[in-house]
Amino acid sequence: MNSQSILLQNIRVNRPDPTYSLELINLIFFDIETTGLRPDRGAKITEVSILNRNSQIYSWQLGFKPGASSFSDELQNILIHLKQGVVVGHNLQFDFWFISYEAEKLGIDGPSLQFIDTLSLSRKVLPQRNSYILGNLLMEFDIKVNGELHNAITDTEATRALFWKLVEKGGISTVGEAGMKKLNWSSF
């Protein structure tokens, strides 16, 4: 591997500075599905999807009960995948709330993550819209999806398409311009 390839790989593996180009970072598109809206009232994670920059999809169907050792193993595996780049998702506060709630119950520390929320990015690029629901934003950009929304894999693929449309429309070139933030697990 030449020195330029090594440098590029290191940029994609390491946490990027806000001035780094979107082209040089590893983006991890992410979505979960749940049985309800509040983990503190018994709602559970049922499905997780992660799509990396190379279009590899990792998917988990979590049909077993949280608290079991297999759930702990799966959650740790999910967190390992999320650490491999900048996480991109729609309304990530919701997803991170569920992940952090389950991690805390199992005594798992949340990793240091950087993320870009397409909900916030949509509000920046498309100000004063009546709705920032994923389905409405997809219609705005005429993005067609394979499958029904509210399926983790479909939503992850839709979020990736939406992200790139927002980047194009907003003339965004760096992760800082896209709204990259550091996740503070203790705030969930």
Image: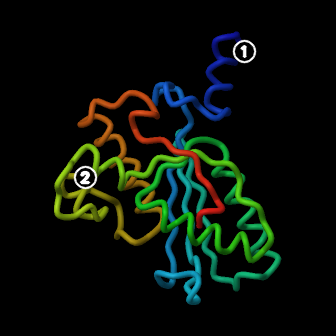
Q: Is residue 105 left or right of residue 185?
A: right
Q: Residue at x 52, y 56 (%)?
A: 30
Q: Quadrant of the C terminus?
A: bottom right
Q: Residue at x 22, y 62 (%)?
A: 136
Residue 175 rendering spot, x and y as whole percentages = 46, 34
Q: Which of the marked residues, 1 or 2, is nearer the chain's N terminus?
A: 1
User: In terms of secondary structure, where does tag 2 sit?
Assistant: loop
- Dot 1 surroundings within 10 Å: few (below 14), some, or many (20 or more)? few
- Residue at the disc numbered 2: 143
Residue extending furthest toward the bottom: 42
Q: Is residue 37 left or right of residue 48?
A: left
> Can residue 28 be seen?
no
Amino acid type of the residue that numbered disc 2 sits on in the rendered structure: Ile
Mark 1 and mark 2 residues within 8 Å of each other at the beta carbon: no
Q: Residue at x 27, y 61 (%)?
A: 132
- Residue at the disc numbered 1: 1
State whether residue 153 is above or below residue 125.
below
Residue extending furthest toward the top: 3
Nearer the observer, 183 or 168: 183
Residue 50 rendering spot, x and y as whole percentages = 56, 55
Nearer the observer, 37 or 50: 37
Residue 59 rendering spot, x and y as whole percentages = 59, 63
State whether residue 99 is above or below residue 142.
below
User: In terms of secondary structure, where does tag 1 sit?
Assistant: loop
Amino acid type of the residue that numbered disc 1 sits on in the rendered structure: Met
Residue 116 rendering spot, x and y as whole percentages = 46, 47
Q: Quadrant of the N terminus?
A: top right
